[in-house]
Each structure stands twice: as C-alpha cells, then as structure tokens.
Image (cartoon, rainbow, N blue to C red):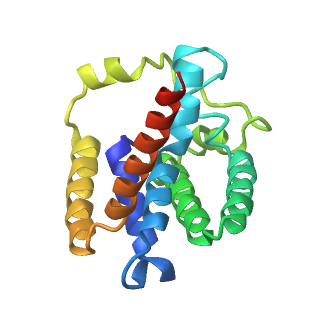
Amino acid sequence: MWPWAHLGLGYLLFRATPAGRTRPIDGVAVLALAFGTQFPDLVDKPLAWYLGVLPSGRSLAHSVLTLVVVVGAVAVVARRRGRPSAAYGFAVGYVSHLVGDAYGHVLAGDFRQLTFLGWPLTPVADYGDEPGLLYRLQHLVVEPQVAFGLALAAAVLALWLRDGAPGLVELRGLGRWTADRLGRSADRW
C-alpha cells in the first residue's frame, strides 16, 4: 500500500471509532493517527532498503510484537503529558497500517506472506528485490490497486475537509514551535 492509501485507510478506521465520531474531532489525535499510519514504513523501509540492517521492508515495525511495545510506550508518554488521545490516534494509525499491508494477502488466501506480522519469531517472506522509494515512484504504474489507493485518498481528503481539517491548527502550531526552537538554537551559535 502506498503512503496516501495508508493515510486514507487510517482516517476511515479512526472515523469509525467513538473518538472519530466526536465533534469537533481531536486534532492532536488526527496528527498522531497520520504519523501512526506511516510509522512502520518510516522505520522498516530505510533500515532494509538503504542500510541493509533489516531483512525486509516489512519486518521489525511491521511485527505485531513491535506494535504492542511501541503503542504501549506511546501510551505511557501520552498519558504523562496529558494527551491520551494522541496515543489512541497513533495506535489506530499503526494498526491500520498493518491491516492495509495484510488484507490483500488474506483476500488472496496467501497466508504465507503474512509472516512479517510475527517477525522475528517467524521469518519474513521473500519479496524478491526491494528497490528504494525513488525507483518505485519513477516506475509507478497506475494499476487497479494504485488507482483504488488514490481514489481512497481523494475521498478521505474530502471527508477530512468536511470534518473541518482536524489537526491542521495543531500542525501549524507545531511548525511555529519548531521554528522558535530552531531559532533559539541558532542564536546560541
């Protein structure tokens, strides 16, 4: 699944939960959700494709074992900071990513390809050559699965806008906070 499809699926699943049906929707939870939908690939792809540390782009962070540990740690930190909704959003996003990577294999009845969910207790499936992101983007073909992902992302973008673009205000605030911190750091030099 491409990043935009993971994001779309995550937002739809979040909207189906009680937290996603509240009004207004918690922007912090949506930002955490967005990060959670990308987290497994942000960890595994660089470590496998570019550094060769992991056996596959679907291994460490795509494992349910890692999901439990990471979501547990995020929940502890979020609770201490008074933001349990952030942990919830991140967890929904993370779970939706694994669902998005697994559903095609489940529908095809190819359960051997799901071993990444149990890594390192189960070996990862052989996905063959795993070229990097730039190669994949340069050779992207809009086949039915890609077209579905793009359509899903477009529909969810419309839904997100209809919901009032939750998370946008918080994202702007995060940008200002980061710029302020970087400015202070630069002043020290």
- Residue for point 38% across, 67% down: 12
Q: Is residue 108 visible?
A: no
Q: Percent position (x, y) of residue 159?
A: 24, 69
Q: Which of these two is toward me, 19 or 153? A: 19
Q: Percent position (x, y) of residue 128?
A: 51, 19
Q: Left or right of 103: which side holds 72? A: right
Task: Name which quarter of the figure residue 75 lies in.
Answer: bottom right
- Residue for point 34% across, 49% down: 5
Q: Quadrant of the N terminus?
A: top left
Q: Left or right of 11: which side holds 114? A: right
Q: Is residue 71 visible?
A: yes
Residue 168 vs 123, above or below: the answer is: below
Q: Percent position (x, y) of residue 64?
A: 69, 50
Q: Percent position (x, y) of residue 43?
A: 58, 34
- Residue for point 67% across, 51% down: 67
- Residue for point 19% across, 65% down: 158
Q: Which of these two is toward me, 74 or 96? A: 74
